[in-house]
Image (cartoon, rainbow, N blue to C red):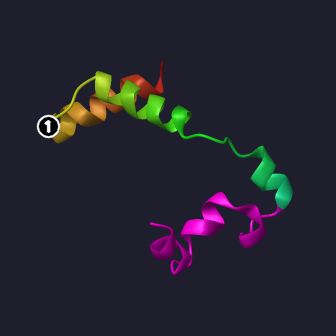
Amino acid sequence: WLKDKESSKFALPTIYHPMSFIPITIWKASPTTTNGNEQAHHNINRDGINLTLLAGIMCGYEYDVR
């Protein structure tokens, strides 16, 4: 796994700041997990999946105005 990630241009810089070009203030302000993103994904799917285009737009609108 490590050998594969060492040859990648983006894998280690995403988890190890000294290899990243992101300023330290932004790096420290970023969350350390993706839990918030996962929760948002779960919440929007709770309203429905496999919807028609119109139903998806209507559900998305209702979600946005909550």
Looking at the rendering, which quadrant does residue 38 occupy? top left
Furthest residue in direction right, as rendered: 25
Tell me which corner region of the image, top left, top right, bottom left or bottom right, holds residue 42.
Answer: top left
The percent coordinates of residue 13 (x first, y second) are 65, 68
14 displayed left or right of 48: right
Where residue 7 appears, x then y in whole percent?
Answer: 51, 81
Q: Residue at x 39, y 25 (%)?
A: 43
Q: Left or right of 57: which side holds 15?
A: right
Residue 45's x, y, as percent? 30, 29
Q: Is residue 44 above or below residue 16?
A: above
Looking at the image, residue 14 lies above or below residue 3: above
SS class, disc 1? loop
- From this view, report whether residue 62 is shown above or below residue 33: above
**In front of the other: 33 or 12:** 12
Identify which residue is drawn at 47% across, 23% down. 65
Disc 1 crowd rating (10 Å Cα; few below 14, some 14-19, many 20+) is few
Residue at 67% from the left image edge and 41% from the top image edge: 31
Which range is magenta?
Answer: 1-23
Q: Residue at x 69, y 61 (%)?
A: 16
Task: Indicate the quadrant where residue 47 lies.
Answer: top left
Task: Identify residue for label 1.
Answer: 52
- Asked whether, in this view, residue 55 is left or right of residue 64, the answer is left
In the visual, does 11 lie left or right of 15? left
**What quarter of the picture does the N terminus occupy?**
bottom left
Question: For the residue marked with disc 1, what is the amino acid?
Answer: Thr
Seen in the picture, residue 27 relative to 9 is either above or below; the reply is above
